[in-house]
Image (tube, grey):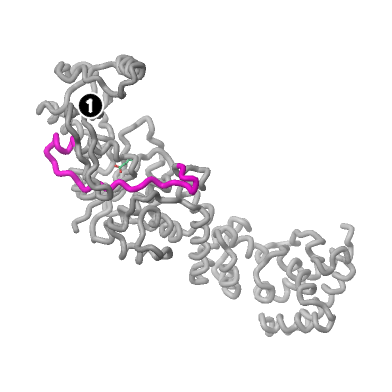
């Protein structure tokens, strides 16, 4: 199958997950069939264009690993890839349609159009241009728009890949604008002209565009061009069936990145919003999805965006990372927390406990919660109540005794033997000797060493911290317990 697909974002702000899902389907189809994935910036509505938005869009694609074969930054055989730089092509197409009597100039003022709309509303008629200028042959010297002369009766059939033939009553479609007064094309004209010139084979887009498709079909017919395949994919909805919005979770891709979702988890999740391999497979790598992807796997049932499902998927992807890779991805979050760069060898020290942390981290910034105390300088902050735990609640002297005993036990571990098994046996023996539950003895050590009640596994943590720092922190705890009123 020959595949050339385009992703046509309008640079109006942060790319939205719904929009990027379309890009993903485009990309998957191109990669699956060895075709081309094209990024085309649809910036014909200059009033909505936002400075820097194009870069945000490209960054989002890059972050997800969706590479493009032709685009505004790299060019390609059909350059330029920004619609605002392709104006002559649209003007040419419009001029040809006027010459052939398939389009016409309309000089109606915005005030007149407004009045027409109001009287239609009053008369409960369908809204739309009343075609006043259609047969007037208006002068090109007057300010004007160009409109397509749509058929007045009959129907237009849109052959949609997922729906089959969808028919539209022409009587309900007005003569829409192709070229605006400012000389810029509308989306309706620009997308058709570009899709034709760029030899696009499949137009994949959200189903909100289905109602515009008959206009595009008529534009292709008027220009005498072959239509691409139309694939209108179901809109993404939240669990409450409402159109996806901020209340269902973040909508911008950048926010997902910042919240600590892994790109491969988000990619997997987005691919399943409207596509599936079979009834049961949910976790699939990008390669597996690419291998299995085709248009027949797309479905019409609405694509439900369940943020909980994404969170679970993310946790699963984090758990399955290679530990060294996990540390590398956690590093920026840790650096943010501790406010300084973390060197490779410092990071490598965490390998001993990486797997244990991985099991607990659901979003990458939590990595910092489980590791920041290794890099803390000066005394840690915690409450004395946490230090005493349940076993020594309100008994600082008992906690102090326990901490001092632990200190003795830990000091006597020989520095070269400062390993997880040695530490475990030393501290378990101590609890037994003292006739206490291990938890009672371990809680003050954990809080003293990490400043937290919830931390990675204790012995691995102490091993990683090293003898000197462990002893120093336990000493600080003992001092606090000796002055319980502080
Ligand atoms: N510029 C349109 C948008 O941002 C693209 C629609 C299409 O893919 O045809 O939604």
The quarter holding residue 156 reads top left
User: Which quadrant is the N terminus positioned in?
Assistant: bottom left
Q: Is residue 416 magenta?
A: no
- Residue 266 at x, y percent in the picture: 44, 57
Total count of labels? 1
Using the image as rendered, state which of residue 233 and residue 44 is in the foreground. Answer: 233
- Which residue is label 1 attached to? 175
Q: Is residue 425 left or right of residue 119?
A: right
Residue 145 appears in which quarter of the rendering?
top left
Q: Is residue 189 visible?
A: no
* Callout 1 crowding tier (Cα within 10 Å): few <14, some 14–19, many ≥20: many
x%, y% of residue 459?
A: 68, 76
- Quarter of the C terminus within the rendering: bottom right
Please state if 474 lies on the left or on the right of 154 as rendered. Answer: right
Q: Residue at x 37, y 40 (%)?
A: 11
Question: Which portion, as a residue range, is magenta?
Answer: 218-242
Q: Answer above or below: position of 184 versus 201.
A: above
Q: Quadrant of ligand 1?
A: top left
């Amino acid at each position: 199958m020959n595949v050339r697909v385009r992703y046509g974002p309008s640079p109006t702000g942060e790319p939205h997950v719904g929009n990027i899902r379309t890009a993903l389907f485009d990309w998957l189809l191109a990669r699956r069939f060895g075709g081309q994935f094209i990024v085309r910036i649809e910036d014909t509505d200059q009033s909505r264009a936002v400075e820097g938005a194009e870069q945000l869009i490209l960054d989002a694609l890059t972050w997800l690993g969706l590479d493009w074969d032709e685009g505004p930054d790299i060019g390609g055989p059909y350059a330029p890839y920004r619609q605002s730089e392709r104006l002559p092509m649209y003007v040419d197409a419009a001029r040809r349609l006027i010459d052939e009597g398939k389009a016409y100039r309309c000089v109606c003022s915005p005030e007149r159009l407004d009045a027409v709309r109001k009287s239609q509303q009053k008369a409960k008629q369908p809204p739309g241009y009343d075609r006043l200028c259609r047969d007037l042959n208006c002068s090109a010297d007057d300010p004007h728009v160009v409109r397509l002369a749509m058929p007045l009766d009959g129907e237009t059939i849109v052959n949609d890949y997922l729906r089959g033939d969808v028919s539209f009553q022409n009587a309900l479609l007005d003569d829409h604008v192709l070229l605006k007064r400012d000389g810029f094309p509308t989306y309706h004209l620009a997308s058709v002209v570009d899709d034709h010139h760029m030899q696009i084979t499949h137009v994949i887009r959200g189903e909100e565009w289905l109602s515009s498709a008959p206009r595009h079909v008529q534009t292709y017919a008027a220009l005498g061009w072959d239509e691409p395949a139309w694939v209108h994919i179901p809109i993404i909805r939240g669990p409450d069936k409402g159109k996806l919005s901020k209340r269902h979770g973040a909508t911008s891709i950048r926010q997902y990145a910042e919240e600590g979702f892994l790109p491969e988890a988000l990619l997997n999740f987005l691919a399943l919003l409207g596509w599936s391999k079979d009834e049961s497979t949910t976790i699939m790598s990008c390669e597996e999805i690419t291998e299995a992807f085709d248009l027949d796997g797309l479905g019409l049932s609405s694509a439900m965006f369940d943020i909980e499902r994404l969170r679970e998927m993310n946790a699963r992807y984090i758990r399955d990372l290679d530990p060294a890779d996990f540390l590398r991805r956690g590093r920026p979050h840790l650096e943010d927390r501790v406010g300084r760069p973390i060197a490779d060898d410092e990071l490598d020290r965490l390998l001993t406990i990486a797997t244990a942390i991985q099991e607990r981290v659901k979003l990458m910034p939590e990595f910092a919660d489980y590791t920041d105390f290794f890099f803390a300088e000066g005394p840690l902050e915690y409450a004395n109540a946490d230090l005493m735990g349940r076993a020594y609640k309100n008994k600082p002297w008992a906690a102090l005794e326990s901490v001092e005993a632990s200190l003795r036990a830990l000091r006597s571990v020989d520095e070269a033997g400062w390993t997880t098994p040695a530490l475990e046996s030393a501290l378990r023996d101590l609890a037994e000797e003292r006739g206490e539950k291990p938890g009672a003895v371990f809680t003050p050590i954990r809080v003293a060493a990490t400043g937290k009640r919830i931390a990675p596994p204790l012995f691995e943590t102490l091993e990683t911290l090293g003898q000197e720092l462990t002893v120093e922190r336990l000493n600080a705890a003992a001092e606090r317990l000796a002055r319980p009123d502080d």
